[in-house]
Image (cartoon, rainbow, N blue to C red):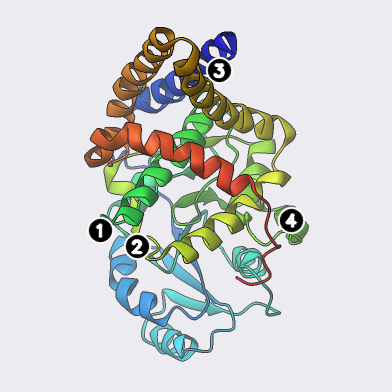
Amino acid sequence: MTLAAIVTTIINLSYWILLTIALCIRKNKEKDGFYRPTSVLICAKNEIQNLTKNWESWKGALQDGDCMVIVDDFSTDGSAEWLRKRSKEDNSVSIVQPSEDSLGKKRALWEGLQQIDTPFVALCDADCSPVSDNCIVMMASHIKGHDAVVGYAPFYKEPSFLNAWQRFECFYTALQYLGFAILGRAYMGVGRNMLVRKSSIEGLSFLDLKPGILSGDDDFLIQYIQKKGSISTCIHPESFMYSAAQTNWKRYEQQKRRHHSSAFAYPFLTQVLLAIFSVSHIISLVCICVLFWSNVTLGFSLLCVRYFILYFLAYFSMRKLAVSDLWKWFPFFDVGLLVFFVYFAIPLNKQKSW
């Protein structure tokens, strides 16, 4: 038990050290004058409230020569009519409808990408808004020499435990996908904030997005690009794309189970690397707790070492990803991750709805 506690703690801390260093030494580029016309692609299904709320912020982020392509995925809430009106008033806005109504947004995403005729395409979701009018420009400043840029999309801060947990879990996920991307092994992106070079997806087929899996459209797109090209990251504060977190636990659980369902289709090595990080976290904490029964001094010492190092690392990584207000609660959230990993490892009935 003692050996297991020490080994898994070292493994888990090694991940944290490597990913935090990768994240923190990544220098943000400022606007460098490198920019090409970009299409903002948004897939929307019954999003009239979000479309009307965020429309002006998206328009404000467009530069000369940019355009917006909205894929109306068979909406029934009046958003299709509202979008058609916007497209008549503004030549930079075009509306696309997929050839068929299907679960998820993979069909909408793929057919929307086929309509892009600009060098770059910025992917966004209807419920998101850029923190700055320089959002797309900042993302573009990181794509030179690369085929795609993966950005960061945090949640708005609200006064609730659920909101705080989602913001922490969003940070923890970003630490991994941004860190691994910086280290040259990108495996996912968030559709709320990605920039893709159009030429890098010329050969993309609908099957490359694995339509048999409800989620993971953005992840599989990044994995497709990673096979033949290179992925950059952008963590500049002006590039962040914010959205509202879920407001009830049931919706949150549905969302997380949907997202996790695509992980089993990741490349095998990626699955192994992510599993080791999660499993070492669980075993480390469990073994340390058991040690308290047999050797209180050793158990307490190991726990102190673990949290001294993690607290130090989390200070810098959480500040980098704009959640420094949660830093003082880090040990609590770290224990919460153990419950999170175990709970979502329990398989439930396959989700049939989006």
- Marks 2 and 1, the one that precedes in the sequence: 1
Q: Is residue 335 left or right of residue 330?
A: right
Callout 2 secondary element: loop
Q: Is residue 36 above or below residue 143?
A: below
Question: Which of the two discs, 4 and 3, labels the residue nearer the N terminus?
Answer: 3
Can residue 148 be seen here? The reply is: no
For residue 73, side relative to residue 79 (left or right) = right
Seen in the image, is 240 located left or right of residue 196?
left
Quarter holding the N terminus is top right
Name the disc covering residue 30, or none. Answer: none
Task: Looking at the image, tell me whether mark 4 or mark 2 is earlier in sequence order.
Answer: 4
How many numbered discs sit on the rendered protein?
A: 4
Q: Comparing marks 1 and 3, which lies closer to the viewer? A: 3
Question: Spatial distance from mark 4 to mark 2, Cα to Cα?
Answer: 28 Å
Numbered disc 1: secondary structure: loop
- The image's mark for residue 210 is 4
Q: Residue at x 75, y 57 (%)?
A: 205
Task: Answer above or below: position of 351 versus 51.
Answer: above
3D distance between C-alphas at marks 2 and 3: 35 Å
- Measured as percent of width and height from the top left, residue 169 is found at 42, 44
Task: In the rendered structure, find residue 158 and report the number of the disc placed on it.
Answer: 1
Front label number (2 vs 3): 3
- As measured in the structure, the alpha-carbon distance from the residue carrying label 1 to the one carrying label 4 is 35 Å
Pointer 1 and pointer 3: residues touching (CB < 8 Å)? no
* Amino acid marked by disc 4: Lys
| Residue 159 placement: quadrant | bottom left
Q: CA distance from mark 1 to mark 3?
A: 35 Å
Rendered image: mark on residue 244: 2
